[in-house]
Image (spheres, rainbow, N blue to C red):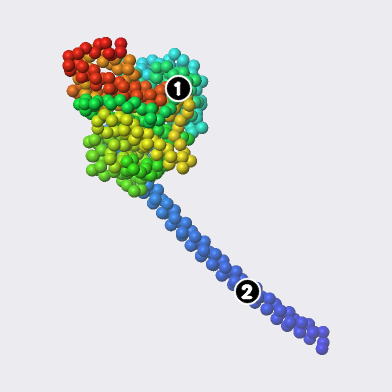
Amino acid sequence: MTVLSRLRGAGGLTAMAGTAFLGKRWVECEDASEQVRQKTQNVKKAMSELNSALDRASQTFEDHCPPTYPPRGLSETVRKLPDWIKAGCGNSEYYCGEKGATFPGGETPEICPDLSKHNNFMAEFLRTHPELYDKLKNKQTSLGVTLAKCIKTGVDNPGHPHIKTVGLSAGDEESYELFAELFDPIIDARHGGYGKDAIHPTCLDLSKVSKRKLDPTGNYVLTSRVRTGRSIKGTRLPPACTFDERRELERLIVKGLMSLQGNLKGDYFPLAGSKSYAPKPNGMSPQKQDELLSAGNLFQEPDSTLLLSSGCGRHWPDARGIYHNDNADCFVWVNEEDQMRIVSMQKGDDIQEVFGRFVNLCDGVQKVLKSEGADFMWNAHLGYILTCPSNLGTGLRAGSLVKMPLVSGRKDFRKMLDKMGLQARGQGGVDADAKGGIFDISNADRLGKSEVELVNIMINGVADIVEWEQKLERGESIDHLVPN
């Protein structure tokens, strides 16, 4: 075989080998292309699923946070209210030129506002200690509460010449510590002497409650009630909490309430229009609202610039509601001025039974909170922590509606009550007028005395008043009995 023939033979073999190699590569390319097509389809499918999920999430957000509902808008139940109220029921701090409410609630201004015409404890103290504003203005708590947030309600509301308000509210528990140089002297002044190193006593021992009957005849005491407030440790208080935080508070509190049994067992009714509670997604029914309203057991949107400026009206009515037991003699207001307002009440004079139910209700809620790793705000100096410094300590008001036209007709009536550690309100509240000589008589103090001490002061005081009313009816003098 010639060399040329061998080369030609070799070329044929080379061509055959090349063809085989290319065929193998072609198959590999086909396989790779199929894998790419498959992966492309998987990616498209995943993208489609992702887009669907985003659409669902977007729809869920629109359902739960539509532009016509907090925090993005105003609730339908709020939109019909006057503009000056609506201004405090959205997501922003209260700002209303009409009411003179223009102080910020976030970052504290460099210069202290003019407080020369204000009549509240906060303004009075800062007028005499102007350097304190500069010392505290750049501080904020670990949860973001500033000095401006705490004093806004007092700056926006100059007050009445004859009615002295506190002018200060806390945004969280730490507010009382970080701004103690402002809070402590105001607490001291408001509570008639309570030093910064004082220790508040707490006692809920039912065995130590006086057994004395308020009204053995049943002719003078119409109703009796005990109420207080409670907050959950580690959270922002109503003036400062966010939309989501308020919902989480509602969830936690209602879980505790719904676990109560016996004579405390009941149901939770969100305010009409609230969309935060799944079992009642539109809040309570109109019928339930009318029932609670007619009985005086319903709180409504804040119609006071004191509350609006504090921030308590934001996102109204979301995550707010009322729990009551089946007997309707125990009520818990959720996320109003305080996270919880706890009330035990009934007709007649059995304040001991009312207080016992009150203690059991507080204990029942606290037990569930602890099982969730939470607890009430409390410390040894201030007792139970609440939004307003006036309610610190016990936060407790034990009172009875008493018919006493003769005793209340005395010129020294208010002075007499003050000496007894009591206060009188009209049937409609602190500013209401009394009708027919009927007054709500309750303990005046909150801080520095225990719950049992305050209840006993009320029991003995009301029982004395009932006896004095009977003596006056018989034409007897009580001058030697009343304190002076």
In the current view of this chain or complex, which residue is farthest to the left? Answer: 474
N-term-proximal mark, 1 vs 2: 2
On screen, residue 143 versus residue 250, left or right, reads right
Residue drawn at x 30%, y 25% is 212
Res. 355 in view: yes
Measure how far apart labels 1 and 2 are at the Cα level.
83 Å
Q: Quadrant of the C terminus?
A: top left
Q: Label 1 is placed on what type of residue?
A: Phe
Q: Quadrant of the N terminus?
A: bottom right
x and y percentages locating residue 133 in the rendered image: 47, 20
Which residue is labeled 2 in the image? Answer: 26
Picture quadrant of residue 190: top left
In the current view of this chain or complex, which residue is farthest to the right? Answer: 2
Element marked by disc 2: helix
In front of the other: 7 or 333: 333
Res. 102 in view: no
Q: Is residue 254 above or below residue 391?
A: below
Residue drawn at x 32%, y 27% is 211
In front of the other: 126 or 402: 402
x and y percentages locating residue 253 in the rendered image: 40, 40
Residue drawn at x 47%, y 28% is 379
x and y percentages locating residue 420 in the rendered image: 32, 17
x and y percentages locating residue 240 in the rendered image: 42, 33
Q: Is residue 291 above or below residue 387?
A: below
Q: Label 2 is placed on what type of residue?
A: Trp
Which residue is labeled 1 in the image? Answer: 183
In front of the other: 371 or 30: 371
Circle on res. 126: none
